[in-house]
Image (cartoon, rainbow, N blue to C red):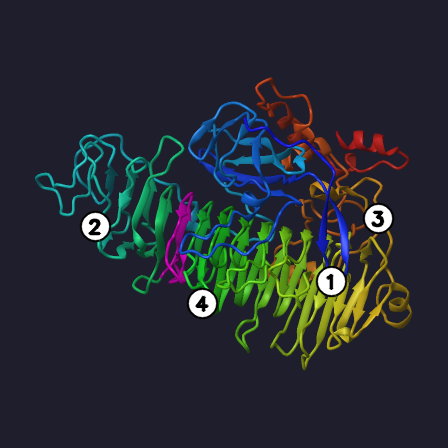
Amino acid sequence: MTPLTTRSSVYFLLAAFWSIVLVQAGPPVAIPMTYHVTKNKQKFIALAAYSDDITYREASHTDEVINFGIRYDDAITAWRIETLPAHGTLFDSYTEIDQTPYLVSDPDEVLYVPNEAYVGPDGFRFSVSDSQGISDPAGISLRVEAEVTLPKGIPALPAIFHTQAPVPAAAGNVETDDWYIDNSHPSATDTPQPGESSPRHGTPDVPRATIPPNNTSFVAGARVFLAGGVETPYQTRSGVTWHQWFFRGTSESPVYVIGINDGPGKPVITGSARGELRLQMEHTLFEGIDFRGLSIAQFEDLVEGHVVFRHCVIDRMNRGTTGAGIQVNRGNHKVFYDVHIKRAGFTEPDLSAENDVHGIQISASFFWVLDSLIHGSAGDAIQINNQASEGLYIARNKLHSDNENALDFKRRYDLIFVENDVWDYRAIDYRSSGSDGTPVLVNQDTPGQPPIYSTVSRNRIWDCNGAIRLQGQEIWTTDNVIWHVHQNANAPAADVAYAIEVGNNDHEDYTQRITNNTLHMVDGGIYIWAGDNSGVKDHHIVGNNFGELNGDSREPYHMRISGNHIEGTILDYNNYSSPLRVRWGSTLRDLAWMQANTANCAQSFENRDPMFADPDHFDLSLQPNSPLIDTNIEHVAYGEFFEQYGRSLMYDANNMPRPQEGGWDIGAFEYRPFCAVAWALWHDLDAYLESEDHDQNGRIDLMDYVAQINACTSESPAKWVREPGLKDEDSDKRRGG
């Protein structure tokens, strides 16, 4: 193993815009995360960290895949698996990890394979190193589920998603509408046998050796089974840039394309340089395929939609200046579930133009992107761009280190962006990037076409140049957790890194709800810079928990409200860890002035420690004696969302129902007054992983706790609440069940 630097106390000089500040650098932080895994299916796991060593430099300008290893190459020197899961196997890419500690070669290529038929909790922990030392271990919680669950607020998936993938026949030598393809089979051949069709479909006993040729049409009900293709990838046609298939499924008889694999690898389909796989399809389901070096596009031939991609990989899509790893925009009702999209796009040698090569580009309606991992795109991880699109549901994904944004929602209706983990978005000086490092954009990029009805809720965003920028009418921004937002050296000098910004909206009215968010270690809090609106201005910035502001910020303000909008802005039930600083119009004001001269801030608090559980390790939940408990109220955002959609948004950043007791808590977290041990096990494993209940090989045994979880969640909540008069340590024991 590589020797690692011990902890040390090192000081960095950080140049602020108006002063020089000494900042003490600490050890790195390994970030705990939760992943949802489908029974009997593999899951790629991204490890994440924060390091004070991170440097932001002008990247090399070459015609290569963009190197997004800023965090990896310049800061984190080692990613280490510390314990192994009890009910599955970890792989480093496709090499089994069978002992700990283990140094991972690529933190985006950790693969978890659950044991056959296992359903229940699992997990492991990891640590990271940088020049300051070694982090404390963090837990990766794995929820292996028999059926896909949905985050709160997300509507039900379309019926085609719930169709079970077919199983290939074990034997047979009679050709049907099905296709059997396996280039690893000793008898595989494309030569038709007597009585077989041309092109040959293959049979279980004598499979086809190559993928179907260009312009193949698959009839309704056809099943395409693709095995092999791991050691020898399948190739699209050579000498041209595209390969096309037609999938003519129906609602009663979809077409299936199923990758068959017994090990950690998936069947690989690859193509020529800058190749494109054109899939004309409706009522079609893809599962378990690794598309490598190809973009996936859909054109105008088949338009009914109802398409599913699940458990697939799209790697190194290599178009030049436009496009996406996958863009299937004809027809509605599409689901991307557990898709790993990575390294989409190239830079250009002269870098004279912006490169818009995205992970996913969406111009359709009723589109789900769920439980996916997207990173390293030349453009956005996900771009939504159509004036008629509606019903876009982006939930529980891991999005990081793209050249532009994690989400760029340009237009139009009903975006729900919830429970995503978003990190490492910066103003990178490629001069081909159009981003300032703000990862989440609800963006009116076309005059007269503002987004309407957008929800940004329960996301975790960290290590970025900004966090959320909002434009449009009727936007609900609730229960998000934002940590370490800091302007970096590549950002324009005039920019200020506010965590949440509110920009222009061409709608007559302007209604915004920024409610119950937690912000800590940010340059600035919330900034409304929008121009004037002719109609009603109604901004509620309420129930938010403002932790520390960065000491070297150019504008260390909790809020900055444009003079165009001060008359329509409500600030209340907010908590400020330091004295309130709000630029109200053109003048900097404090809490006393706001309370005396406006109708604002009557129920707000300043200089009040929120008592975060462990802020240095990204745990911004509340301690038992936090003054934020039961000092909030239910705000209008939740009722408005329910009235619009008939679904509840009343959950905190840990998916706990709000409120837990008689009153609401300020910020993104409700204090968890019940079954803390079981809840920690189910959510982040930290409580359990710090215990001694794992064996000498570093594996953890969670089965003893499953009964605790079940009992905890089935008992009356009255048994779980804090009991008056208990000391804090007794209260913790009570919460432990």
Residue under label 3: 609
Q: Of marks 3 and 1, which one's residue comes earlier in the chain?
A: 1
In which quadrant of the rendered image does the C terminus lie?
A: top right
Relative to the observer, which residue lies in front, 95 or 103? 103
Identify the residue position indicated by label 2 in the image: 213
Mark linked to residue 722: none
Q: Which residues are drawn in magenta? A: 304-331
Secondary element at image label 2:
loop
Cα distance in 3D space between marks 3 and 2:
65 Å
Q: CA distance from mark 4 to mark 2?
A: 38 Å
Circle 2: is it few (<14), some (14-19), or many (20+) Cα within 10 Å?
some
Task: Write down the residue under mark 4.
Answer: 352
Q: Position of residue 45 (x, y in %)?
A: 52, 39
Q: Nearer the viewer, mark 3 or mark 1?
A: 1
Judge whether residue 252 can be spotted in this image.
yes
Q: Secondary structure at mark 1?
A: loop
Residue at 24% across, 57% down: 240
Whether pointer 4 and pointer 1 mark residues with C-beta atoms closer than 8 Å, the reply is no
For the residues labelled 3 and 4, the Cα–Cα distance comes to 49 Å
Counting from the top left corner in percent of width and height, residue 286 is at 36, 47
Which amino acid lies under the numbered mark 2 shown in the image of this protein?
A: Pro
Q: Secondary structure at mark 3?
A: loop
| Number of residues whose C-alpha sits closer than 10 Å to that of mark 3, classed few (under 14), some (14–19) or many (20 or more) | some
* Residue placed under numbered mark 1 in the picture: 554
Callout 4 secondary element: loop
Which amino acid type is shown beneath numbered disc 3?
Answer: Asp
**Image point 72% across, 68% down: which residue?**
539
**What amino acid type is highlighted by mark number 4?**
Ser
Residue lying at 29% horizontally and 41% vertically, measured from the top left? 233
Q: Pick whichever of labels 4 and 2 is earlier in the sequence.
A: 2
Q: CA distance from mark 4 to mark 1?
A: 30 Å
